[in-house]
Amino acid sequence: MPQQKASIIGAGIAGIATAIRLAVKGYAVEIFEANAYAGGKLSEFEQQGYRFDAGPSLFTMPQYVDELFKLAGKNPSDYFTYQKLDVVCQYFYPDGSQLTAYADPKKFAGEVMQKTGEPPAATKKYARNSQRIYNITNHVFLEKSLHRLSTFLNLKTVKSVLRLFQIDAFRSMNQANHSFFKDKRLVQFYNRYATYNGSNPYQAPATLNVIPHLEQHFGAYFPDGGMYQITNSLVKLAESLGVIFHYQTPVTEIVLENYKATGVQTTEGFIQGHIIISNMDVWFTYRKLLHQHPNLFPEKILGQERSSSALIFYWGIRKQFANLDLHNIFFSADYEAEFNAIWKQKSIYHDPTVYLNISSKYKPDDAPTGHENWFVMINVPANTNQNWDSLIAEARNNIITKLSGILQEDISALIASESILDPRSIESRTSSYQGSLYGNSSNNQFAAFLRHANRSSKIKNLYFCGGSVHPGGGIPLALLSAKIVGDWVEAPLK
């Protein structure tokens, strides 16, 4: 019998990981990618001697990458290496205070005590709460599909379900964080984790206070060679398993016969597939690739509020700053007003929180000698036809003024090169509807249940992976979506 084929739409990190899992399972796998490169948001580019990781810059849960190599019978360190960060992030507050987020829990608790007066017991209590939420939710909400009966028919799930009242779903993150800490700077520190999945800490359920556990317990890492090495190493692994990549080959339609996916129509013609996996944003999957079948659209899911987006300036800087690290945060003086601007006014606050990533701190050849490559990002609303040119110009001035004041240096005079990524270009380059980074937002307690399943309930042989479907956005969850699909797809017939 001929080898069964799997066709994957999109070479984002979840699409590549799914390809690896299905190739190991025995499928002949082909990936169709509209761009000339793999990785989706996890890509890179160079400009005037500076190299930039274009998208995700924080690497956590490396075990999910290592797992793919082990699954293929490979030694992960032969393909992909990384180092754990001793300092996760440097935080700068408007009052002039600074907080160093050390990876070591005791050292971090001591730093918090010294800078905010919050006792180590409070920090430890918070960490235990975050870990408890993780232990309850991990097996149900992250590693398994919520749309399979088998998920709810095992002992781990039963134990988790019986403890769901402990995941703090009926308070907001901000309300919960205020109950743990008195110092408003530490509340702001923990509220920031809502941005890890594009949500609002003043609306999102306190269940999302699980996120600090992923960073502070499991650690943050820097891939040797930069973030794009995650993509590079997995592409090489996939190719070694026989996966075929078709670049600059957009899929224009998922072909159905009697509610069964039978292949994809591409710019190179029709390609048959026994199973089809879409790594494209689920909104575009339906609206563009299944546009002939509107009766199959999950309108309630497609109509949900989208996550926030990002405005990123890639600056080549003619100086090195000793007081900056790989990851740096410059907080807004009024965090709630900033989120109100994003979520209620659909605009950009005049004093935005600025995230600054400098990979040349760990990879010096990412910038010329004596220079740094600055990835400068602020959270912004999804694209609903705002006047982005005006918003970007104003935000650029506000960011430069803010950083210049804190760093006591005229940043504008140091910018040697510049590129900009905004919600419009995020949408056009990565097929992310409205430029949202994480699909639907998580601004209500039922968000985990409202994400699209990893398999269609109406179309046979059609599966979904990536940040717009269960379990969510970000590198770890995107890789887990691939794991769920890989577990769900039956082994090919021999």
Image (cartoon, grey):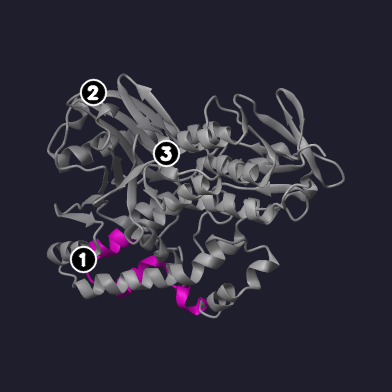
Mark 3 residue crowding within 10 angstroms, few (<14) / some (14–19) / many (20+): few
Inter-mark Cα distance, 1 to 2: 37 Å
> Separation of disc 1 and disc 3 at Cα?
33 Å
User: Is the stretch drawn in magenta largely helix, strand or loop?
Assistant: helix
Mark drawn on residue 368: 2
Task: Between label 1 and label 2, give the one nearer the viewer.
Answer: 1
Q: Residue furthest right?
A: 258
Alpha carbon of mark 3 to alpha carbon of mark 2: how far? 29 Å
Proximity of marks 3 and 2: CB atoms separated by less than 8 Å: no
Say whether residue 44 is magenta: no
Q: Nearer the viewer, residue 248 or 405?
A: 248
Of badges 1 and 3, the one in the foreground is 3
Residue designated by label 1: 106
**445 is higher (above) or lower (below) than 473:** below
Picture coordinates of residue 128, whole percent (x, y):
34, 73
Q: Looking at the rendering, in which quadrant would you find the C terminus?
A: top right
Q: Is residue 264 left or right of residue 309?
A: right
Q: Which residue is mark 3?
A: 78
Mark 1 or 2 closer to N-term? Answer: 1
Q: Quadrant of the N terminus?
A: top right
Q: Amino acid at mark 2?
A: Pro
Asked where in the image residue 46 lies, by quadrant, the reply is top left
Look at the image and tell me whether residue 474 can be seen.
no
Residue positioned 23% across, 51% down in the render:
86
**Three-letter code, disc 1:** Lys
Answer few, some or many: residues within 10 Å of disc 2's Cα (few below 14, many 20 plus, some between 14 and 19): some
Residue drawn 52% across the image and 27% down it = 37
